[in-house]
Every structure is written in C-alpha cells, then in structure tokens.
Image: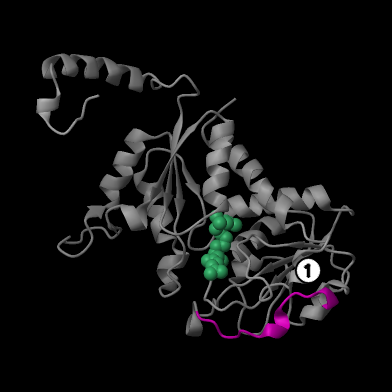
C-alpha cells in the first residue's frame, strides 16, 4: 500500500508525469470509464432526499457517473456579485467555480432555494442564472429560487397516468405549514399546468396570491371547499407570501386549510398529490395520506422518470 502525502511517496515522479499526460489525453477523449463516459455534478445549497437520489438513480440507469457536492456545508462560500472586492467572508467567485465545474463534468444540477428576504434577487434567479451564465455545460434546475421543473414534470407524468377524463379538474391548494417556504413548487406546477389540457384552479387564503405570470390562465378561488367540488386531482403545497409588503412571510397558519377526508369527499374521487417532504396532520391528515386516493408514492417514483428524461435530453444520450 502507498500513501500520497508528499513527493516522497512517489518513486518515479518524472515517469508519473509522462503517464499523467497519457491519462489526460484519455480523459479528453471521453474519459477512462467504460460506461457512457459522461459525468454530472449535483450541487446542493439546500437539503434534499428525492431530488438527490432520483438524479443519482437516473444517472446510474443511463451509465452516467454522478458527483454530489453539498456546497453550503462543504464548499467555499461563493460570491455572485460582479466587480466586488473580495475581502469579506466569501472565498470563491462564481466565475471560477463555474469554470472549474464546467471543465470537470458534462452537466451540472443546481439546488438553490429562495432567500425569501430579497424578492428582486430571488425572482431574478440570481444563483441559477449566474451558473447558467458562467458554465459552459448544461445546467439542470434541481429547485431554484422560483421554480422546480423536475418536480412539475414528474407531477404532469403522474396526472397523465392517473387521469380518468381527458380534461381533468386539477386543484392546487395552499395548506398550512410552521415555516416560511418558497413559492417554487407552486409556481412551477402552475407554469406546467397551464401548458396542459386541465381545468386548472388555485386556491389559497387572501394574502397568498402568487405571481400573476405564474398563475396564467388558472382560476383563483379563495374558498377552498368550493375549489374542491368536482376536482379530479388535489395538489397540496404550502408557500409563503409573494406580495411585496410581506414577501417570504407566513401571513396565516390557518389549520382550517389542512386537507382532510371531509374536504376530499367534496371532490370527484380525487387523487391526492404532494411533492414531499410533507408535514403530516398539518398539510394533510394521516387519513388522507394513508388512503387509496393518495398517489404521493407513484408521484415520487416519477421523479426518476423525469430526471432520466431530462438527463437524456441535456446530455444527448441516444
Ligand atoms: N423540494 C420540495 C420542497 C422543498 C421545500 N420544502 C421544505 O423546505 C420543507 C421543509 C420542512 O417541512 O421543514 C419547498 O417548499 O420548496
Ligand atoms: N420533492 C423534492 O424535491 O424533494 P426533495 O426536496 O427531498 O429533493
């Protein structure tokens, strides 16, 4: 066994340099791996279970090597502003970080939630757009400040699989939560839902109106019970306030908005959906989550489907 702690550990340093130059040629010609030779970097500024594991499983299914990097706990603190004098706490600029990642991998996935304090930066997608600007490889959104398209794509696949009518009534309902959460999942669900042949409704208490450009043609209904009538799909999600005056704040924790069986009985035998993780008996009751109407497990399983499709497309895998 050998260590590699200093040059003292290398018997033939000059020979190693020759060998390393040969290896570099192999790496440039598609890598020494006998699989697709493709690799992705999955960068996380925030926690994840489904996104991380479904991306890794999808990569595995495609013969792609995935490298997970929990940047906020393990990496250098990144500077995203241009032209700053970097004499504070931030050690590395996005320009170099993105450049290095681009030179190592074939694609990069980024998870970076909203700050919920700076609406302008969040809705300008400061972090994601800086990666897109400075990376020379495809960037995959693994939930950004305002959008979660891998989730919404999986949601649409799930609705397609379970719908019993050609134009289902799909209801996105706000539900209470103890913490301030981003609007990304709701925004993205509405963006994708607007592209489908759905009777699309969004219901929430006053004060939780979403960005009108995300709501699009969806009907806004402030009476949750009315919204549930005749629904084929109930999609529950919490989000914090979008309005300027109280952006990112919890303006209501009204437990009357929890999805329960009594409300599900108002629907057209609707299927219940949620992106997970879910707070049981806050967002929805155990009774709903453990009922036959709940399709949260197949929905989560389709995260692999959506991830695999996206990786195939961005990496042009035939
Ligand atoms: N990726 C799916 C949802 C992620 C995030 N939820 C959360 O942070 C929930 C955390 C909690 O329940 O403590 C959100 O709402 O955007
Ligand atoms: N739904 C979702 O994105 O789950 P994770 O946050 O666990 O990745």
Q: Is mark 1 within 8 Å of ligand 1?
A: no
Colour scheme shown: one colour
251 within the magenta span: yes
The residue at the point 14 percent across, 62 percent down is: 87
- Secondary structure of the residue carrying tag 1 is helix
Which residue corresponds to the image point at 39% horizontal and 22% vertical from the top-left? 31
The structure residue drawn at horizontal position 79% and vertical position 55%, both measured from the top left corner, is: 197
Between 251 and 62, the one lying in front of the other is 62
Q: Is residue 108 left or right of residue 184?
A: left
Q: Quadrant of ligand 2?
A: bottom right
Q: 191 or 9: nearer the eye?
A: 9
Percent x, y of residue 305: 66, 41
Q: Is residue 183 visible?
A: no
Does residue 162 lie above or below 120 as drawn?
above
Residue 35 spot, x, y in % from top left:
50, 22
Q: Is residue 16 visible?
A: yes
Left or right: 49 in relation to 235: left
Q: Residue at x 84, y 53 (%)?
A: 163
| The quarter of the displayed image where residue 257 is located | bottom right
Residue holding disc 1: 288
In the image shown, does 292 or 113 lie closer to the viewer? 292
Give the image location of residue 70, x and y in percent. Answer: 39, 52
Q: Residue furthest front?
A: 1
Answer above or below: position of 259 versus 6: below
Q: Indicate the quadrant where residue 187 lies.
A: bottom right
Q: How many marks?
A: 1
User: Pointer 1: residues within 10 angstroms few (<14), some, or many (20+)?
Assistant: many
Which range of residues does the magenta coloring cover?
Answer: 249-262
Which quadrant would the C terminus be assigned to in this image? top right
* Residue 193 place in picture, x, y as percent: 71, 58
């Amino acid at each position: 066994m050998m260590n590699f702690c200093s040059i003292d550990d290398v018997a033939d340093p000059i020979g190693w340099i020759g060998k390393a130059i040969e290896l570099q040629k192999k790496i440039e010609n598609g890598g020494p791996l006998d699989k697709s030779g493709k690799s992705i970097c999955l960068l996380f500024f925030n926690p994840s279970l489904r996104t991380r594991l479904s991306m890794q499983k999808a990569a595995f299914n495609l013969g792609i090597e995935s490298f997970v990097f929990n940047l906020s706990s393990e990496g250098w603190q990144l500077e995203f502003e241009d032209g700053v004098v970097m004499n504070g706490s931030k050690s590395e600029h996005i320009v170099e970080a993105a450049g290095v990642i681009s030179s190592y991998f074939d694609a990069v996935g980024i998870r970076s939630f909203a700050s919920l304090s700076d609406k302008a930066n969040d809705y300008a997608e400061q972090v994601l757009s800086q990666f897109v600007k400075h990376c020379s490889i495809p960037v995959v959104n693994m939930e950004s400040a305002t959008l979660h398209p891998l989730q919404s794509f999986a949601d649409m696949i799930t609705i397609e699989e379970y719908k019993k009518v050609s134009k289902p009534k799909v209801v996105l309902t706000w539900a209470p939560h103890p913490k301030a959460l981003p609007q990304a999942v709701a925004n993205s669900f509405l963006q994708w839902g607007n592209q489908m042949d759905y009777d699309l409704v969004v219901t929430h208490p006053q004060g939780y109106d979403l960005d009108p450009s995300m709501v699009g043609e969806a009907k806004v209904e402030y009476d949750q019970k009315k919204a549930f009538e005749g629904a084929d799909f109930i999609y529950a999600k919490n989000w914090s306030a979008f309005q300027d005056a109280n952006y990112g704040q919890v303006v209501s924790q009204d437990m009357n908005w929890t999805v329960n069986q009594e409300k599900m009985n108002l629907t057209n035998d609707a299927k219940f959906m949620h992106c997970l993780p879910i707070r049981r008996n806050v967002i929805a009751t155990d009774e709903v989550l453990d009922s036959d109407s709940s399709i949260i497990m197949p929905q989560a399983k389709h995260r692999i489907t959506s991830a695999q499709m996206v990786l195939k497309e961005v990496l042009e895998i035939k």
